[in-house]
Amino acid sequence: MGIEERRRRQRRQLRDGILAAAREIARAEGWPAVTIRKIAALVEYSPPVVYEHFDSKEDLLLELVRTGYAGQLGAIEKARASSDDPEQALLEMSRAWCRFAFEAPDLYQAMYGLGGVSFPVAELRKEGEKIAEAMAGTLAEALAKYGKEEEGVWEKVTIAWGTLHGLVALAMAGRLPGGEGEAERLAERAVRGHLRAWLDG
């Protein structure tokens, strides 16, 4: 390995370490506690070194949010591929949504404006739209299977998204008796109910 390649590798490793340190602080103390100074202390470098990789704390958080959206999209797409039946696929996708949120709560909170983190919606619109498109496509297939019109699919996706996100947020805030397990159970029940209503309507 040449000197330049070694330097690039070390730079990538430090960048990854900075991102991991931010997540560690967020998990332990919440996103408002995340500062460049704390991150620098955790990776054992000075703050200017962190600024060599990220222009600001907001720039760093935006990178983590994009990572989160990519992870959630991957989980949902994998769930979609797990079944040839679009109805079953939608249930699997709802489970994947909840599972991702509870396995990476720090990223989920940053992605969806929980825990004191917020970004202009336009900054992240494309990432969120990819997830919505995956769900809309599967819902359209489920409707078409029963000869139902695909009109209003995006509105239905928004309803499903609001339901899933609301249950996850309640569980994360400690406002849902039964916590994560109950959120997942109710999410599946809600999606089943919505889907049945849309198919019967």
Image: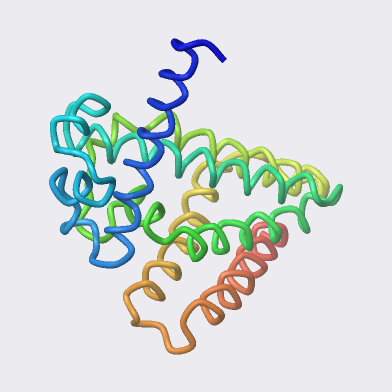
Residue 14 versus residue 102: which sits nearer the camera?
14
The extreme right residue here reads: 84
Q: Identify which residue is drawn at 63% across, 74% down.
A: 189
Report the side of 29 relative to 90 (left or right). left
Question: In the image, residue 9 lies at what x, y percent?
Answer: 47, 24
Q: Identify which residue is drawn at 44% across, 10% down.
A: 4
Above-or-below relation of 29 to 182? above
Question: In the image, residue 136 lies at what x, y percent?
Answer: 61, 41
How many numbered marks appear? Answer: 0
Report the side of 195 relative to 111 (left or right). right
Q: Quadrant of the C terminus?
A: bottom right
Q: How is the image coloured?
A: rainbow
Question: In the image, residue 157 lies at what x, y percent?
Answer: 54, 48
Q: Quadrant of residue 187?
A: bottom right
Question: In the image, residue 168 lies at what x, y percent?
Answer: 44, 67
Above-or-below relation of 96 to 111? below
Q: Identify which residue is drawn at 57% across, 73% down.
A: 184
Report the side of 10 relative to 147 (left or right). left
Residue 73 versus residue 41: which sits nearer the camera?
41
Residue 117 versus residue 10: which sits nearer the camera?
10
Q: Identify which residue is drawn at 50% across, 77% down.
A: 180
Above-or-below relation of 113 to 102? above
Q: Quadrant of the N terminus?
A: top right
